[in-house]
Amino acid sequence: MSVGILSLIILALAVAGFFLGRSRALQSVQGDPRKLHSLPVYYGQTVFLFTAVPALLLMAAWLVVQPLVIDARIVGQLGPEVAADPSAATLAMEDVQRIASGLDALQAAAGLSNDEMRKMRADLSDIRGRMADVGVALGAEVNPKIFEMAKDFRDMQRGGALMMTLAVLLAAVAGFVWSVLRIKADFRARNVSETFVRWVLIVSAGVAILTTVGIVMSLATETIRFFSIYPASEFFFGLTWNPQFRGGSDLGLIPLLWGTMYITLVSMIVAVPIGIFAAIYTAEYATPRVRSVVKPLIEVIAGIPTVVFGLFALVTVGPFLRDYFAQPLGLGNSGSSVMTAGLVIGILNIPFISSLADDIINAVPQSMRDGSYGLGATKSETIRKVVLPAALPGIVGAILLAASRAIGETMIVTMGAGASAKLDLNPFEAMTTITVKIVGQLTGDLTFDSPETLVAFALGSTLFVITLALNIFALWIVRKYREQYE
Amino acid sequence: MYDTPNSTEASVSQTHIKIAARGVQVHYGEKHALKDVDVDILDKTVTAFIGPSGCGKSTFLRCLNRMNDTVSVARVSGEILLDGEDIYDKRVDPVQLRAKVGMVFQKPNPFPKSIYDNVAYGPRIHGLTKSKAELDEIVETSLKKAALWNEVKDRLQETGTGLSGGQQQRLCIARAVATAPEVLLMDEPCSALDPIATAQVEELIDELRSTFSVVIVTHSMQQAARVSQKTAFFHLGNLVEYDATQTIFTNPKDPRTESYITGRIG
Ligand SMILES: Nc1ncnc2c1ncn2[C@@H]1O[C@H](COP(=O)(O)OP(=O)(O)O)[C@@H](O)[C@H]1O
Ligand SMILES: [Mg+2]
C-alpha cells in the first residue's frame, strides 16, 4: 500500500474519530453539553489527534529508518572487506539499487508474479537484454551475486512496506480505540488537546533547530578535514588564491574576503541612502493613495530572481560603466567589475531596506510626531529630530540584514564582477567573492578528499560565521529598539 | 452661546480675552463633530472643557493650535482669534502658531532622547537661545516650573522614556513650557496618571496660570472644579454652557449641564 493511500486512510479514520468522539461525549451526558467539562469539539479533537498524529509520526520514522536498516544488511552480505571500505560499499549499493529498480520495471512491464521474479537467475534469463527492453540500461553483464542481492533487496523492501502498513494501521486503530473509550463527562478534553497541540509545536520547533544543527555539523566536519590537510594560517592570511587541481595550490582567503567586502560596500553605498529616503517618503510624505501604489511597486524589485539582475549587470550595467566611466577615466576596460556587481546588488537591496525601514518608521508612535508638531516643529524637523532618531536602531538593524544579503549574493557577482580573485583598489577591476569561489570549487566531477574541494567548506564556514555575527548584531539592535516603547 | 465673565468673579473679569472663537464648525469627512461653537478664553485663567466622551472637546482644543491640520479628513470653519488675529488666516504659519499655543497630550509622549534634550527641543528648533548657558537656564526653569527639577537634576542625560508615568507627563509639560507659549492646551493630561501624580500636575496647572492661559480637557468634574476658573460644557458637538466654574457646578442654567454634573448623562 502506498504511503499516500495509507495517510488518507489514517486521516479518514481520524475524521471519523472526531465525529464519534464528539457524539460519544454528548451521549454520555444525554445531549446536555453544559454537563461536559469541555466543549464537545474538544472531545472530538482528542480522538482526532491521538488517532492521526502517533500513526503518522510512526510512518515518518519508519520511512527514514527502513532504508538504513536494509542498506546495512545488504552491505553486510557483501563481506567484511567491502563493508569496511565506504566507497566500495557505496558503489555496490548503487548497483544493487539500479538492478532492483530494473526488476521493478520488468515486473510491471511483463506482469510477472513475485514467485516468478524470485526464480529469475542472472546467468540464465538474459537479464541485461530484458532490462534494456524496459528502458533500464546496464553497463555490464549482471554479476550473479549482485543480482541475488538485488532480489533480496526487493524482498526486504516489500516486507518492510507491509510491516509498516500493519504497524501504522495498528497504531492508528489503537489510538482511536483508546481515546474514544476514555471519553467521559468529566474527562478534561480541552486541557488534553491543549497539551497535545503544545507538544506538536515543540516537536516542530525541534525539527527546525535540529536541521540547523545538522547543517552546521556537516559544515564543521568538512572544515576540520580541510584544516587537517591545509594549514589554517595560510588559509586565513594567504594573499593569493590560485587553486591547482593537480595539487600545490595557494588557497588564501584574503583576496576573496576583500572582493566580498568591497562589493558589499559599494552596494550599501547605493542601497542605504536610496532605500531610507524612499522609506521616509512612503512612510511620512506619501498620501495613503500614493503609498498604496508606490510601496508595492518598489517591492516588486524584491520579487525578481537574482539571476535576472545578473543578466542586467552583464549586458547593461557592465558595458555602460566600462564605456562611460572606466575607459574615459583610464581605469581599465573590463566589463565585469566591483562597480557593476555592487551597483546591481545595491539596486536589489533598495526594496529590502526601504520596506523594512518603512515598517520601522511607521512603528514610531504617532504621539511622538504629535508631540513635536505641538511644539511648533515643521514636518522635516520632526522627521529629522524625532522620527529618525527613534527609528535609528531599527534602521541600523535593517541595514545590517541587507549587508548580510549582499555578502551572500552569488549570481550577480558571477555575472557582474567576474571570477578572478584579486587584491585591487580599482573599483572598475574584475574581482570576486567568497560565494562565487565556493561554487567554483565544487563544479565538475569531484571527490571530497583534496584541499581544492574541501576549501569550499572552509569558505562556507567563514561566510556562515560572518553573516551569523551580522545577523545576531542586527537582531540585538532591533530588539533593543523594541524595548523603548514598552 | 456664551456668557460674558461674571462680574462677581473679580479676578477673572479683569483679565483680557486671549482667544475668541466664533461659529467654529468641524467636520471629519461626513461627520459633523463640532457645531457652531463660540467661546472667549481669558488670559491668565484656567479654562476647563468637560463633557461626555466623543462630544468634541479634543476636537475643539485641537482647533486652537491647528493640530487638526495634521488630520487629513478634518475640515474647520469659523473664526478663531488669538489676540485679535485670525489663526486660520492664510498668512499665519501653523508652525509659528504652535510655538505660541503649546500642547500637552493625554498620554505622556516624551521623545526617546535625554531629559535635557526633551526640554531643549522647542528652544532649539525655534532658536530661542544664544548660548549653551542660556539653554541650560531655560531647561532648569522649565523643569522647576513643572515641579520635576529636584527629581531629575542629577540625571538630565538619562533618557526621558525611563521616567515614571507621572514624571513623563511633567516632563512633557516642562517641554511645552520651555517653548515659552502664551497659551497651554492640555488634553486630559492626568488620565494616565495615578492620584499622587495627578495632584502634582493639578498643583502645577494652578501655578502655570500666573504666566499663561491654560485650557484643560478633563473627564473628571472634580478636577475641573479644583483647577479651573471657567468651565465649558460640551454635548454632542455643541457648546451647551460656558460660565464661571463656580456657577456651572452650583447653579447651571441648562438642564443638560445639570444632568451631566449630577451624573445622569455621560
Ligand atoms: N481623526 C478623526 N477622524 C474621524 N472622526 C474623528 C476623528 N477624531 C475625532 N473624531 C470624531 O469626532 C467626535 C469628537 O471627538 P473628540 O473631539 O475626540 O471627543 P472627546 O475628546 O470629547 O472625547 C467623535 O465622535 C469622534 O468619533
Ligand atoms: Mg478626547
Image: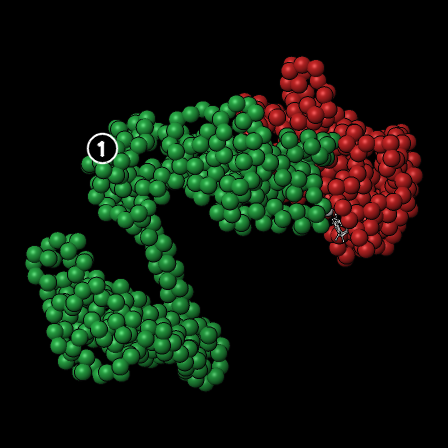
**CB of mark 1 near ligand 1 (< 8 Å):** no
Q: Position of residue B259 (x, y in %)?
A: 80, 55
Q: Residues within 10 Å of mark 1 (few under 14, many from 20)?
A: few
For badge 1, the amino acid type reads: Gly
Asked if residue A166 can be seen in this view, the reply is no
Q: Which chain is red?
A: B
> Is A113 situated above or below A432?
below
Relative side of A260 to B211, left or right: left
Quarter holding the N terminus of chain A is bottom left
Residue at image position (34%, 49%) is A212
Camera-nearest residue between A282 and A413 = A413
Q: Position of residue A469 (x, y in %)?
A: 39, 37
Q: Quadrant of residue B187?
A: top right
- To which residue does mark 1 refer? A248
Q: Residue at x 49, y 81 (%)?
A: A32
Q: Please tell me which residue is depicted at 88% across the width and 35% down the height of the picture.
A: B89
Q: Tag 1, which chain?
A: A
The green chain is A
Residue nearest the observer in this picture, A397 or B135? A397
